[in-house]
Image (tube, rainbow, N blue to C red):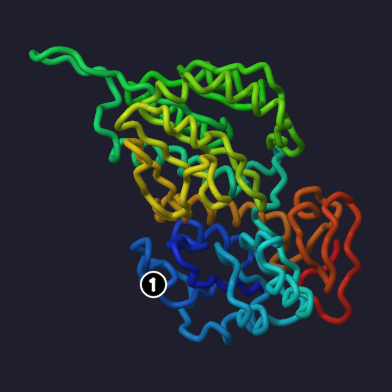
Amino acid sequence: MYVNIAVLRETRPHERRVALTPSVVPKLIRLGAKLHMQAGAGTAVHLPDAAFDNVAILADRAAMVADADVVLAVQPPALGVIDAMKPGAVLACYIYAAHEPELVRHLLAKRITCFAMERIPRISRAQAMDALSSQSALAGYYAVALGMTHMTSVLPKITSAAGVIGPAKVLVMGLGVAGLEAMATAHRLGAVVEGYDVRPETREQALSLGGTFLDTGIDATGAGGYARALSAAEKSTVDAALTWHIQSADLIITTAAIPGKPSPKLISKAQVAGMKAGSVIVDLSAEGGGNCEDTEPGQTKLVGAVTIVAPLNVPSLLGRDASELYARNQHALLALMMKDNILVIDWTDEVLAKTALTHAGKLCDAAHVGEAPPPASGKNSATAA
């Protein structure tokens, strides 16, 4: 007996990642998986089909998912994939349901049990499954490299016979996983690094990475480890405290994002207008509209003498390592529900209950941990334990 797992080739723009890598294949097999993968799924990250031992490579996507107990992907799949899945099967990928209402309707109609990777709770025992964090760490690293390619100055202090130049001043705004990795990377490369976040508890983390912390006196700690929105008065106070630091930075990296919601604006047009000539902003929150009022998602542009870089899907730009981490995240999630070569979902498990988006034709209420969604009628590969 085994669990039939199908891995899709990604089709959405800007997406290079794949939900399975060769190193994770034996781990899934040990859980009781029989693996199938759509032909060419790893091509974009230079993983040919031949690199996947003990994985059946299939060209017919619809036939592959029709027999699958579990379908794995990175981005939300095409509606035709959902329609081809057997009722009661499991889908695990990013969904962001607020932006995918039609997809959610198809999930409900086919009674698919969908685990949305962005809903993984940020608790200690779920860290190995936290795809948002694993991918954000790569984005934070890459933001520094991306900023350097657009700067007209160097990051570290360099001494030569002609004299001394540098170091550059780097400001990181938003000290989640991506922001802290950006601080660490910039510090390792010799920059003078400052960090800012509306959550005061990030101060110690910033200091531990060799940077300084900009304290505006505002505490906007919100639910789930994210920041809450600032009031107009709070934003005015923050802007006044940060303007000098923004306008004296050589490189600014902004990372403030709330999954599924617009990115908060951290840098105003007026602040950009006062920035130094040749300075650079790398806006990692372009997917949600950006943290800078001048950001154009997916574009690199000059505003006066300031370069604003707003890449989309940054983890995909490091597709090989991003795929490796993402595949490990999904393996850790599947390990919670694959027991003795069968798929058994324990709805009293906080991680599974909070990550589930749909089950048995109904939306799951993640607020009620431990309350199982009503079981599907008939044979179902995703049964309640």
Q: Please tell me whether residue 358 is drawn above or below residue 274 in the rendered image.
A: below
**Quarter of the image holding residue 32?**
bottom right
The disc labelled 1 sits on which kind of residue?
A: Asp
Q: Residue 246: horizontal and vertical position, in percent? A: 46, 25
Residue appearing at x 66%, y 21% in the figure? 200
| Residue 322 in view of the camera | no
From the viewer's perspective, is 77 left or right of 224?
left
SS label for mark 1: helix
Q: Nearer the viewer, residue 52 or 264?
A: 264
In-front residue for pair 351/271: 271
The mark tally for this picture is 1
Quarter residue 144 falls in = top left
* Residue appearing at x 70%, y 69% in the figure: 90
Image position of 280 with respect to 75: above or below: above
The answer to whether 125 appears left or right of 284 in the picture is right
At x 60% / y 67%, what residue is drawn?
76
Name the quadrant of the N terminus.
Answer: bottom right
Vertical order, 368 against 96 (above or below): above
**Relative image position of residue 194 (x, y in whole percent):** 47, 21
In this rendering, the answer to whether 71 lies above or below 329 is: below
Quarter of the image with the C terminus is bottom right
Residue occupied by mark 1? 49
The residue shown at (83%, 74%) is 361
Relative image position of residue 306 (x, y in whole percent): 35, 36
* Residue 330 horizontal/vertical position (percent): 60, 56
